[in-house]
Amino acid sequence: MADLNTTDINVSDLNGSLDLLNDIIVPQSIGYFPPASGWIALVLLLLSYGFYWYIKKQKLYQSNLYRRQALQEWETIQNKETPLKQSQALLLLIKRVALQHFGREKVAHLNGDAWWNFLERHSKVKIDNELRQLIHEILYSPTASITQEQKEAITILTKVWITTHQKEEGESND
């Protein structure tokens, strides 16, 4: 007699029929949104840094408006009729820029060596004694005359000063 506990593998069993098998249940895919909190924090951090950088650049751009206007005026001064008039206008432009940037209290009273030392201390220009004497003559002598080379030296001096001047650390307009 055949053992009831043994089954013949050749016999088809209804419980093991392939017709009764169901598809494998696949879980839903993980969505991209909402992202994990770490990604949200990273995006917020990057956005805040970008906003800070943008505001900082805008303030710098606005604070240098006077410098851009001075350089535009520097360009228009180059079209004046004589080298003497060009040089006088350029020297007055330096004084106006200094008054605007450093304030009347710090600049208005400066003259002579104190003025030249101020210009050298706050920028990359170096003004030798010969150029100082020439500028003094241009500004105060009614019979002053200059050569094209001297005018070029003054032109370069003014452009370098306008583009490179800055306040010393801890200095303010007060």
Image (cartoon, helix red, strand yellow):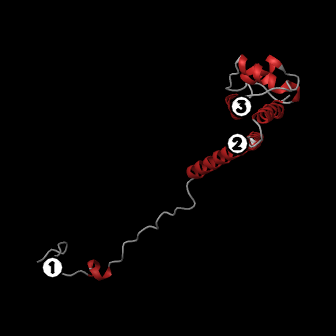
For marks 3 and 1, give the CA distance. Answer: 113 Å
Q: Which residue is mark 3?
A: 151
Residue 121, percent across and down?
72, 21
Above or below for 125 versus 23: above
Residue 40 vs 71, above or below: the answer is: below
Q: Quadrant of residue 147?
A: top right
Q: Position of residue 160 (x, y in %)?
A: 68, 32
Q: Which residue is mark 2?
A: 56
Q: Earlier in the sequence, mark 3 or mark 1?
A: 1
What is the x, y in percent for residue 25?
Answer: 40, 71
Which of these two is toward me, 54 or 95? 95
Marks 1 and 2 sit apart, C-alpha to C-alpha, by 83 Å
Q: Position of residue 31 (x, y in %)?
A: 51, 64
Q: Residue at x 68, y 22 (%)?
A: 126
Quarter holding residue 90: top right
Q: Amino acid at mark 1?
A: Asn
Q: Amino acid at mark 2?
A: Lys
Q: Quadrant of the C terminus?
A: top right
Q: Nearer the viewer, mark 1 or mark 2?
A: 2
Depicted 156 relative to depicted 73: above or below: above
Query: Can the viewer see residue 125?
Result: yes
Residue with the mark numbered 1: 10
Q: Is residue 140 left or right of residue 25?
A: right
Q: Is the Cβ of the residue at disc 2 closer than 8 Å to that at disc 3?
A: no
Q: Name the residue rendered at 56%, 62% in the picture.
A: 33
Which quadrant of the rendered structure holds the N terminus?
bottom left
Q: Secondary structure at mark 3?
A: helix
Asked if the residues shown at circle 1 and circle 2 are in contact, with their CB atoms under 8 angstroms apart, the answer is no
Q: Would residue 169 be seen by someone viewing this image from the given angle?
A: no
